[in-house]
Amino acid sequence: MANYQNYRRYRNQGGDGRQRVGKAVLLLAAFLFIYLIARAIFGSDKNTSILNTLNEPLANVGSANTANNINGIVNGAINGNNNSNTNTNVNASPSASSSTFSVASNCAAVKSRGSETKKAVALTFNVGTIKEGSIDAVLTGLKNGSVPAAFFATGDVASGNAALVKKIADANFPVYNFGNSLVKFTDLQEAGITEQLTKAEASISAVTGVSTKPFFRPPYNAVDDTVLATVKKDGYCPVVSTFDALDWSADSTAASSKERVLSKASNGSIILMQASNSITAEILPDVISGLKAKGFTFVSLDALLASSS
């Protein structure tokens, strides 16, 4: 009889253990359900506070191993959910992220503007020469305005001014290919075109750590069918501009360049400015605020061109 009673006590203890584990699982499901609803309404909480909340009931109903195992599952669920909430707002955070643009799909011809159905524009800056103070001011203006932009640098500039080109890349602005030197690509044979692109790619990517593809800007806008076919074969799409701010011209003033940009901007415009020009640095804050006041959204170059045919 004593043996039978001991056996019953043993069974009851096992049953109590299973009941505790069952309660732990039910509580876990309830807390996860509440957490996901709260996250959807109020945004993410810190993982540690969630786990601390879960640990209190778990410690009372199950073993330490049970709690640890369940916490591992919770961590995976929370971290997996966090990874899916990446900020993709280009106006909030200019970024040299991977391109959504495909040369094969989106580059049937030389690109001079994006889609005209959206009130969006892209700022682009040539870096054919270096004036450090002006470029610093341009970067500050872009950051203060919270707008994306694209820079086109020559290989010669990257080789001779690596620190400044790196500063552009470190500010999370993409640096694309402007050729190795300021030559007319229409004067070159295919081999010369490829050599220019390859040298510039090597010099710039050595500084920035990323490729200059998929965009190439032909110096002096010198592009023809041979240039288009060759650069596409080398993985690039040639991009010119919708209009030039003429901030480089001796005939221009800060007022005339600013007015030119504000008056000529239209849906899908690719705006060309010079990164090393003091006029550019001076007018950039007013250009950004003025275009925003007109209802334009600033987008990255790849986003603008990926949405065009």
Image: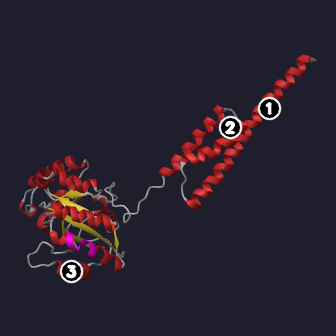
- Classify residue 303 by image quadrant: bottom left
Q: Which of marks 3 and 2 is nearer the N terminus?
A: 2
Which residue is under mark 3?
A: 260
Looking at the rendered structure, the kind of residue marked 3 is Arg
Q: Where is residue 272 in the image (x, y as percent from the top left)?
A: 20, 70
Which mark is nearer the camera, 2 or 1?
Answer: 2
Q: Residue furthest right?
A: 1
Q: Which of marks 2 and 1 is nearer the N terminus?
A: 1
Q: In this view, does 175 lie above or below 253?
A: above
**Mark 3 touches mark 2? (CB < 8 Å):** no
**Mark 2 touches mark 1? (CB < 8 Å):** no
Looking at the rendered structure, the kind of residue marked 1 is Gly
Q: In this view, does 128 lie above or below 203?
A: below
> What's the CA distance linking mark 2 and mark 1?
18 Å
- Classify residue 251 by image quadrant: bottom left
Which mark is nearer the camera, 3 or 2?
Answer: 2
Q: Is residue 283 magenta?
A: yes
Q: Which of the numbered marks, if any, corresponds to residue 15?
A: 1
Q: Which corner quadrant holds the C terminus?
A: bottom left
Which residue is under mark 2?
A: 59
